Image: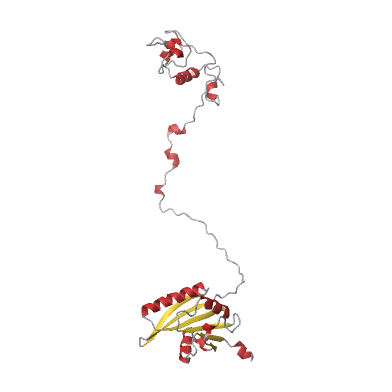
Amino acid sequence: MEAKAMQRVALVISDEQVVQMTTINDALRELGKEALQCDVQLYTQSSSQSKLPVESSSIEFLICISRSHAYPDGSWFDEISRALKPGGTILVYKVLQAAPKETEKVIISLERQLLLAGFSDAKGVQQSSNAGLQYVVTAKAKKASWKIGTSFALKKGTKAPIKLQMDDDSDLIDEDSLLTEEDLKKPQIPVGDCEISTTKKACKNCTCGRAEEEEKVKLGLTTEQLNNPQSSCGSCGLGDAFRCGTCPYKGLPPFKLGEKVSLSSNFLVADI
């Protein structure tokens, strides 16, 4: 009894009522010598049932023999996965009366169904035909070798440092060689209240001439126009009320022609 309990089992299921022993032997040969040494259990007309009469993870080899395109389907692949042990093998053995091109489609469909059901290493093969009337198509796959809920540690890959290899250093340019003698000279810091000021404007008691230059820029007038103002219309010195829109003296206080235009101390100060 103990020797029988240790005996490996190969379960054969089929949607047919009767299965020939030669067909079962051919399917066992596809699985190898280990399957030929197993105890064989046959379960016919399984397509009419929804579950296999075996315990979960109890079968090492399972062979499904069918002549129908619709069997086994997705639900049956799930049931087969339940019955197989971790690492167990499934073999779908189909005997079809179809053209070679149609059998190729059957192989592709079986491989896809096995992969979607969680099996690995799915591989389909077309066997020899019987006088051109019948074709045998087989698809073999394995159940994962681990059980649901199993955990294991993942190995972290070591990161190798990135190494840059330069084949030729002749293309490299020394940055210092790009600098000229002028670039290497130490800049001279200008001396004066106006230059040192953080506002970069003329100081209140400007004596360097920066205030006058700022006035020229803001007013848009030349030195000659400020020192010796002239007017082609004769109204420029009367004030803005009498000046035209393009008058260069617009915005200045009234003045006498030929005399230097003088600005009040608060002329450039904002009103607000």
Residue closest to the far right: 2
* 163 relative position to 98: left or right: right
Q: Nearer the viewer, residue 210 or 265?
A: 265
| 83 over 163 or under it: above or below | below
Residue pictured at 44% horizontal, 31% vertical: 182
| Image quarter of residue 51 | bottom right
Q: Position of residue 223 (x, y in %)?
A: 42, 15
Residue closest to the far left: 132
Q: Nearer the viewer, residue 257 or 144?
A: 257
Q: Position of residue 138 (x, y in %)?
A: 45, 81
| 93 over 220 or under it: above or below | below
Residue pictured at 50% horizontal, 18% vertical: 211
Determine if residue 183 is in view.
Answer: yes
Determine if residue 192 is in view.
Answer: no
User: For the C terminus, which image quadrant?
Assistant: top right
* 210 relative position to 150: left or right: left
User: For the N terminus, which image quadrant?
Assistant: bottom right
Q: Position of residue 155 (x, y in %)?
A: 57, 66
| Image quarter of residue 230 | top left
Q: Position of residue 106 (x, y in %)?
A: 42, 77
* 234 relative position to 210: left or right: left
Figure coloring: secondary structure
